[in-house]
Image: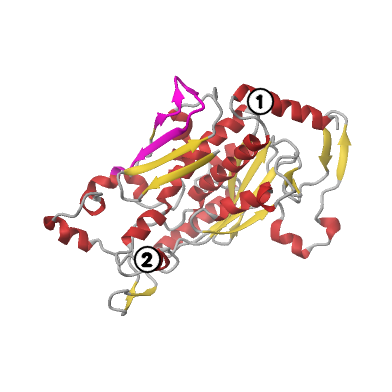
Amino acid sequence: MRFLTAGESHGPGLTTIIEGVPAHLPLTQEDINVELKRRQGGHGRGRRMKIEKDLVTITSGVRHGMTTGAPIALTVTNDDYVHWEQVMSAEPLKAEDEHRVQTKTITRPRPGHADLNGAIKYNHRDMRNILERSSARETTMRVAVGSVAKKLLKELGITVGVHVVNIGGVKASGTYQSIDELIERAEASAVRCIDEEASEQMKTAIDEAKKNGDSIGGVVQVVATGMPQGVGSHVHYDRKLDGKIAGAVMSINAFKGVEVGIGFEAANLPGSQVHDEIYWNEDEGYKRSTNRLGGFEGGMTTGMPIVINGVMKPIPTLYKPLKSVDIDSKETFEASIERSDSCAVPAAAVVCENVVAFELANSLLEMFSADRFDRLKEQIDAHIEEASRF
């Protein structure tokens, strides 16, 4: 599969086209809307989420609830566009609109954002041309794409979930017995944390940051079960599935680190406490006694649960703004403020989950015939059976 997104934060809407989804996969708009709604929730979200009601329209590639094999086109309307129509219009600017548009011109880059670097790269004196596209609003469509991937995975018996393990230094310690339990408990929490005590502390930390005009980040953990063994490849760097996932997670706005399994902790431990011993089970085939490597060896899946941690920095748009320099006057100013969240970690967790889901689904479509869903499932089932008898 491949996809392309388009759209600006305050533009008319957001669009994506997904190519390579097999025919005969059950898919409805509601499958996608459920994920979009999850992205909008979470303690610490700002006013924008009260304005937008993200609902997708499928305009291509699905007929009567089934994919056709053609490219799937998805659109989401920006409800806030009615207040930005003149500022964000694609038409040449009219003289009577110049003053209003100029009041929305951005010449003061915000530290931590793409504003200054993008303006230099594309030679824009109005940095709104940069911030509108670099905004995390684009992740709406990353989630929409991921929801299609999640539907594919679900039909193949693969489940993907996410929970928050750290916000602002408050670390969760909750355990779970199954992926279904993890999902249920995480979704019941306003911060997507399965540790109830830590959840309350996280909410307090978010409220304190908001009161202080500040922001905080955190760590999210994606878990996927049911992936077959041997998906990915060791033969080239760009075919290693854990590498692809790491790159995808790092492409999410404000994400600054990725761990697979125990991740950076491996640097502090001897090899005997890092690698997962292999054993044979007559009913299930090869298994690992532990899962410290997060479901990967040599760039390929081991059949164990996939565990990915993503580190999100605090959102750089602050209500006690940092110092910056006006690109026109070169004078020091306090950075411009756009609407923002005090903490978007619970929402970013959903983005991370869907980004990982896309990479998992895509890896299966690369390994097995993907034109028809029934044949895809037959091949994967045959591969799992073969691996169990290897």
| Mark seen at residue 203 | none
The crowding category of the residue bearing disc 2, from other C-alpha atoms within 10 Å (few below 14, some 14 to 19, many at least 20), is: many
Task: Answer left or right for 206 relative to 304.
Answer: left
Mark 1 residue type: Lys
Quadrant of the snapshot with the C terminus: top right
Residue with the mark numbered 1: 377
Q: Residue at x 62, y 22 (%)?
A: 374
Direction bottom: furthest residue: 331
Q: Quadrant of residue 12?
A: top left
* Foreground residue among 371 and 189: 371
Q: Residue at x 56, y 44 (%)?
A: 353
Residue 313, placed above or below residue 285:
below
Residue 266, placed above or below residue 376:
below
Residue with the mark numbered 2: 119
Q: Position of residue 181 (x, y in %)?
A: 63, 36
Q: Position of residue 191 (x, y in %)?
A: 51, 48
Q: In this picture, which residue range is highlighted in magenta?
A: 58-79
The number of numbered badges drawn on the structure is 2
Q: Quadrant of residue 213?
A: bottom left
Mark with earlier residue (1, 2): 2
Q: Position of residue 257 (x, y in %)?
A: 60, 59
Direction left: furthest residue: 96
Task: Answer left or right for 370 relative to 340.
Answer: right
